[in-house]
Amino acid sequence: MSKSTAASNGQNLWAKIPKANAELFALTYGALVTEVMRDADGNAHEVNEQLEKIGYSIGIRSVDEFLAKSNAPYCKSLEDTAQVVGKTAFRMFLGINCDVQQHSPTNFSLILQENPLSLFVELPENYKETLQYTILYCGVIRGAMEMLNYKVECSLVKSTLRGDDVDEIKVDLKQVLQDGAGDDYKEE
Amino acid sequence: PHMSNQVLLFLIVGKNEPLYEAEIHKRGSTGNSDAVARQSYFVLHSSLDLVEKSAWVTQNMYLKVVDKVNQQYVSTFLTAGNIKFVLLHPGRNEESIKNFFYDVHELYVKLSMNPFYHYDTPITSKEFDKRVKAVARRYLS
């Protein structure tokens, strides 16, 4: 899919989709993170894991909504998919403009200049290096891609909450899964 | 001879304890001795009862001067959540102090939106401290 149509598609979808208040969105996520922290007794690695799992749940569902609403054309390669994820999907769901950097045929990064989830957030000193506050995005991408038969590993490599100037999500393709029912459904 | 106080003391006081404090030095001042600093804290804390009284008299958050000791005044600002901003200062300059309080209040509201900051707890954010001091330099020094 050409870069410009992915972006304009995203813009049109964002215009049509029902919106939520940005502050309410950020504060709700903040409350969620606080609860997860309480459950995990402040263990940052456990919190990261939980948030990623929550993101995964969101991703596997959002992808259906996205495909239904966006009418995005068939992607012939990971490069196309990267453009659709970064320019169309992120624009449609979050209203933000992402930069897509293709590092290799199996590896790309999304650069976020603004991050709606981290509005008002300042990480306490003892969590600055360990808590990946917006790791939710990584889970969402991982879940959505899995529904499209791409098994990926996603990580937050740059974060404005840690002092970087942008947020960067790196997506690494590990395996292209075969279509068909999972092992549970295999005949004995 | 009484040393004219060139240092302002700003405190944010919660229900039970001070949550934040900052010393604001007027340009050219050399700072306070320990004894004067202790006296300043005493003056501020003893005026807290008067703050409660003033709060019932007006609907405004800015309560102006609530107490006067020696040559110093205590001005207060009460947030919607009943957190008290108190400032010990020489001389009356209502406009600057009111502006100072309102700007600090904005910073305080932003801080309270941080999911990691809990209401009525000590404020440890370095960003907050930096910004409050910048506001102080702008209006009070």
Image: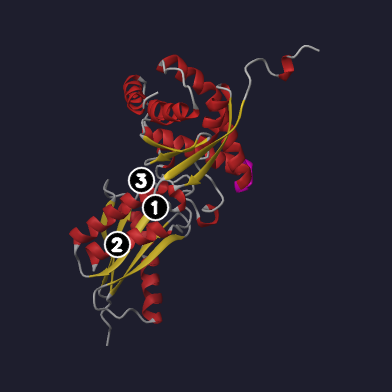
Labels 1 and 3 within one chain: yes
Q: Nearer the viewer, mark 2 or mark 3?
A: 2
Q: Is residue B116 left or right of residue B72?
A: right
Asked if the stretch drawn in magenta spans residue B60, the answer is: no
Q: Which residue is drawn at 75% across and 14% down?
A: A186
Q: Which of marks 2 and 1 is nearer the N terminus?
A: 1
Residue A141: give x, y in percent of width and height. 52, 31
The quadrant where residue A151 appears:
top right
Q: Which of marks 2 and 1 is in front?
A: 2
- Which residue position holds label 1? B83
Compute the Cα span from label 2 to label 1: 21 Å
Which span is picked out in magenta? A39-44
- Which residue position holds label 2? B134
Please tell me the numbered disc located at residue B80: 3
Q: Which of marks 2 and 3 is nearer the N terminus?
A: 3
Residue B53: give x, y in percent of width and height. 33, 55
Q: In this view, does A140 lie to the left or right of B1?
A: right
Q: Residue at x 47, y 60 (%)?
A: B17
